[in-house]
């Protein structure tokens, strides 16, 4: 862990905007290291945990999969994060994002057309339902 400042889970949640149950889940799957425990058995985190959880949360917001985040953290934990390897993970994720954007644009076009036809009353039945049921 990083510097010891004795942050409890509620404060970690507040500082990172991450739900307490999500923090516990990240511990169970070893994205976050198991925290120290106080005499009262409360989890105690430090500033390194705050940084790590903030990284995980931001990476999730950007759509990185948990396995990708695990790899990025492992590269970072090694001290000399191989920039080329990090770039490769990011480039792969970027390709996935671009594919999703293209899919969403196609979906937007189909839905916009169906909504326009529905409003115009051009077709019998419901154009939106027809568009959704087309194989």
Image (cartoon, rainbow, N blue to C red):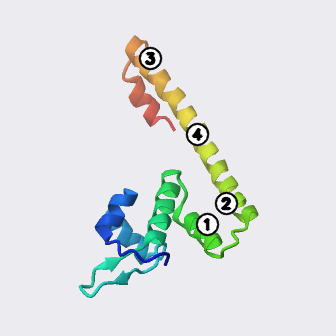
User: Where residue 68 sits in the image (x, y, percent)?
Assistant: 59, 64
In whole angstroms, how far apart are the C-alphas of marks 3 and 2? Answer: 42 Å
Q: Residue placed farthest to the right in the image?
A: 84
Name the side, left or right, on which 122 lies relative to 88: left
User: To which residue does mark 4 refer?
Assistant: 101
Q: Secondary structure at mark 2?
A: helix
- Camera-near label (3 vs 2) is 2
Question: How far apart are labels 4 and 1 at the CA level?
Answer: 24 Å
Mark 2, other Cα within 10 Å: few <14 / some 14–19 / many ≥20: some
Instruction: Tell which circle, 3 or 2, labels the residue nearer the N-terminal end.
Output: 2
Q: Which residue is mark 1?
A: 72
Q: Earlier in the sequence, mark 4 or mark 2?
A: 2
Which label belongs to residue 81?
A: none
Q: Is residue 24 left or right of residue 62?
A: left
Query: Mark 3 or mark 1, which has the lower sequence index?
Result: 1
Say which of marks 1 and 2 sits in front: 1
Disc number placed over residue 117 in the picture, else none: 3
- Residue 37 shows in the view: yes
Reading the image, the residue beneath label 2 is 89
| 65 versus 108 height, above or below | below
Pointers 4 and 1 in contact (C-beta within 8 Å): no
Give the SS element for disc 4: helix
Label 4 or label 1, whichever comes before in sequence order: 1
Q: Is disc 1 in contact with disc 2, using a CB cutoff of under 8 Å? A: yes
| First in residue order: circle 4 vs circle 3 | 4
The residue lying at 49 percent from left, 78 percent from top is: 1
- Image coordinates for residue 22, horizontal then vertical, percent: 36, 65
């Amino acid at each position: 862990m990083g510097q010891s400042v004795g942050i409890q889970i509620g404060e970690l949640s507040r500082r990172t905007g991450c739900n307490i149950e999500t923090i516990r889940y990240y511990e169970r799957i070893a994205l976050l290291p198991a925290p120290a425990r106080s005499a009262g058995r409360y989890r105690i985190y430090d500033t390194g945990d705050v940084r790590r959880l903030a990284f995980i949360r931001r990476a999730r917001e950007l759509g990185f999969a948990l396995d990708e985040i695990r790899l990025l953290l492992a590269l970072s934990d090694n001290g000399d994060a191989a920039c080329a390897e990090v770039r490769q993970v990011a480039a792969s994720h970027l390709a996935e994002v671009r594919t999703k954007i293209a899919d969403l644009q196609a979906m937007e076009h189909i839905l916009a057309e169906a909504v326009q036809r529905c409003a115009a009353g051009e077709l019998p039945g419901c154009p939106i339902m027809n568009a959704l049921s087309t194989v």
